[in-house]
Image (spheres, rainbow, N blue to C red):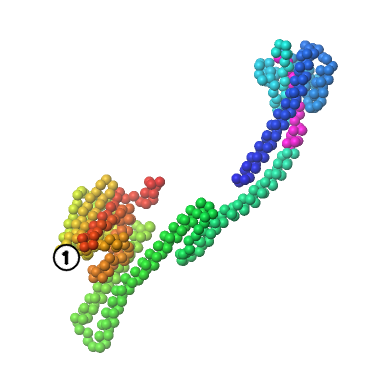
């Protein structure tokens, strides 16, 4: 279209310009010949009624040359000469004639159907007055015939140029989209596995940017794939470990039963261990289900206005017996009453994990301080403890699934390694943020920031736009 449209415009311009120039040239030729005759009209007193044979011959020849009609009008607008002999003695009132007598441009031409009409004033050089008007009307059929011939020639040229444009556009399009086929082939190659090879398309700036975006996407897919494989491996290991322990304990009981009677104390001990492993397995599965639900993009979140002070008080009340067993002091500092739009269940799970971790990974007779504050937009929950702290190198990984700073100590405590991952997911679902500040051996501080008003992602994106 970029090629064909200018061709059509060019065709229209050629024909239109040719017509205008041909008419203008014809009018100029006629005007030049008329001016020669008008000078003799004044000199021979033709306008006063004289009829020299020479003038009549010139007028007749002018009409014959152009196959047209010559009309001469005197200053009284009366036709004193008509080469066709139709209107002599009549009064003519026409715009072009009046313009000659009223100080207009005088000379001019107009198109009336297939005729060109040229008007030339008859000027008396002695008085500089207009003594009359000479009008000649000539047919323009020859000009239209020339235009038709030119139109046919231009039309053939238009067809040739259009075909050439289409062919050129076809090959240009193939050359332009060739780099994109490489991207298409790469996309089609992603079938169940992530491509290891990145692509490069330096042909155009746009393709280079597309290749860079594709490579970034490929990198993110690899990271996600590695994370998925690691997650599956960790889940398999975590679920298999309690089953292996239960299998060993059950096999031991069976073997001892075959050898003789199993003491009640040993039977009770083994069954207690099996029950603990079942509880551990159930805890892992429960945490996994919670994490999967929060990871879904379409995860349901039931938001309602909630008294955050009361919610935290209930959490501390539930965890107080666990802290009391080790002499750990639980303290709540609430500076202002806070009402916020949150999902009570998910926020309770997130804050419970933080506070319970502060208890689990604390020293005996330690403390856990929880503070609640608010501003115009967010509320803040800070959980500080006097526990073992987190090494600086591990702080970037503690929110990863199944990550444990001290695996042997975590086994003793009984954690699944999913608590902080669940907490982070719950906070992000509320469009909040979580930060950790810790020094090894000096305790840890977790800070959670959550908006007071919940804004759905779609509405948030519209506001941003």
Report if residue 138 lies within the magenta region.
yes
Q: Position of residue 21 (x, y in %)?
A: 70, 31
Vertically, is 119 above or below 43?
A: below
Dot 1 crowding, Cα within 10 Å, few <14, some 14–19, many 20+: some
Q: Viewed as shown, does residue 208 lie left or right of 33? A: left
Q: Residue at x 26, y 55 (%)?
A: 447
**Picture coordinates of residue 393, whole percent (x, y):** 29, 62
In this view, the residue farthest toward the bottom is 259
Whether residue 350 is visible to the viewer of this picture, yes or no, is yes
Note whether 247 is above or below 213 in the view shown: below
Q: Is residue 337 left or right of residue 108?
A: left
Asked where in the image residue 85 lies, by quadrant, the reply is: top right
Can the viewer see residue 321 in this picture? no
> In the depicted view, which residue is nearer to us: 243 or 179?
179
Q: Name the residue: 72% across, 29% down.
A: 25
Residue 100: percent from left, percent from top: 69, 18
Residues in magenta?
130-148
Q: Which residue is mark 1?
A: 364
Using the image, determine if residue 211 lies above or below residue 246: above
Q: Position of residue 363 (x, y in %)?
A: 18, 64
- Residue at image coords 31%, 58%: 424
Q: How many marks?
A: 1
Q: Nearer the viewer, residue 1 or 300?
A: 1
């Amino acid at each position: 279209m970029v090629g064909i449209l200018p061709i059509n415009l060019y065709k229209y311009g050629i024909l239109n310009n040719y017509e205008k120039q041909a008419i203008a040239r014809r009018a100029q030729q006629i005007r030049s010949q008329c001016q020669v005759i008008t000078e003799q009209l004044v000199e021979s007193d033709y306008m006063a009624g004289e009829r020299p044979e020479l003038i009549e011959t010139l007028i007749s020849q002018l009409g014959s040359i152009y196959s047209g009609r010559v009309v001469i009008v005197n200053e009284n607008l009366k036709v004193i000469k008509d080469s066709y002999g139709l209107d002599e003695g009549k009064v003519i009132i026409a715009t072009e004639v009046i313009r000659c007598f009223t100080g207009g441009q005088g000379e001019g031409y107009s198109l009336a159907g297939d005729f060109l009409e040229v008007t030339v004033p008859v000027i008396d050089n002695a008085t500089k007055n207009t003594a009359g008007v000479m009008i000649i009307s000539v047919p323009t059929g020859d000009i239209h015939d020339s235009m038709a011939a030119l139109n046919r020639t231009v039309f053939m040229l238009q067809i040739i140029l259009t075909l050439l444009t289409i062919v050129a556009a076809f090959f240009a399009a193939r050359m332009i989209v060739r780099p994109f086929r490489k991207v298409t082939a790469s996309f089609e190659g992603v079938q169940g596995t992530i491509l290891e090879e990145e692509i490069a398309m330096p042909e155009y700036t746009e393709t280079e940017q597309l290749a860079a975006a594709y490579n970034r996407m490929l990198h993110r897919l690899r990271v996600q794939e590695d994370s998925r494989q690691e997650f599956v491996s960790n889940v398999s290991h975590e679920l298999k470990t309690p089953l292996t322990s239960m299998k060993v304990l059950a096999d031991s009981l069976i073997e001892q039963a075959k050898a003789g009677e199993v003491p009640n104390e040993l039977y009770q001990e083994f069954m207690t261990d099996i029950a603990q492993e079942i509880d551990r397995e159930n805890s892992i599965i429960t945490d996994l289900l919670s994490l999967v639900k929060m990871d879904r993009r379409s995860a349901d979140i039931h938001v309602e206005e909630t008294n955050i002070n009361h919610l935290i008080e209930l959490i501390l009340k539930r965890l107080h017996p666990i802290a009391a067993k080790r002499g750990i002091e639980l303290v709540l500092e609430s500076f202002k009453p806070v009402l916020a739009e949150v999902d009570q269940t998910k926020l309770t799970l997130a804050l419970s994990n933080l506070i319970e971790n502060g208890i689990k990974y604390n020293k005996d007779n330690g403390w856990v301080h929880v503070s609640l504050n608010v501003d115009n937009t967010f509320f803040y929950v800070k959980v500080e403890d006097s526990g073992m702290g987190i090494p600086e190198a591990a702080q970037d990984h503690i929110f990863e699934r199944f990550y444990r700073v001290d695996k042997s100590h975590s086994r003793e405590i009984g954690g699944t390694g999913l608590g902080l991952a669940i907490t982070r997911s719950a906070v992000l679902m509320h469009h909040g943020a979580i930060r950790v500040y810790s020094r090894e051996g000096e305790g840890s501080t977790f800070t959670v920031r959550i908006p007071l008003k919940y804004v759905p992602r779609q509405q948030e994106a519209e506001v941003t736009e």
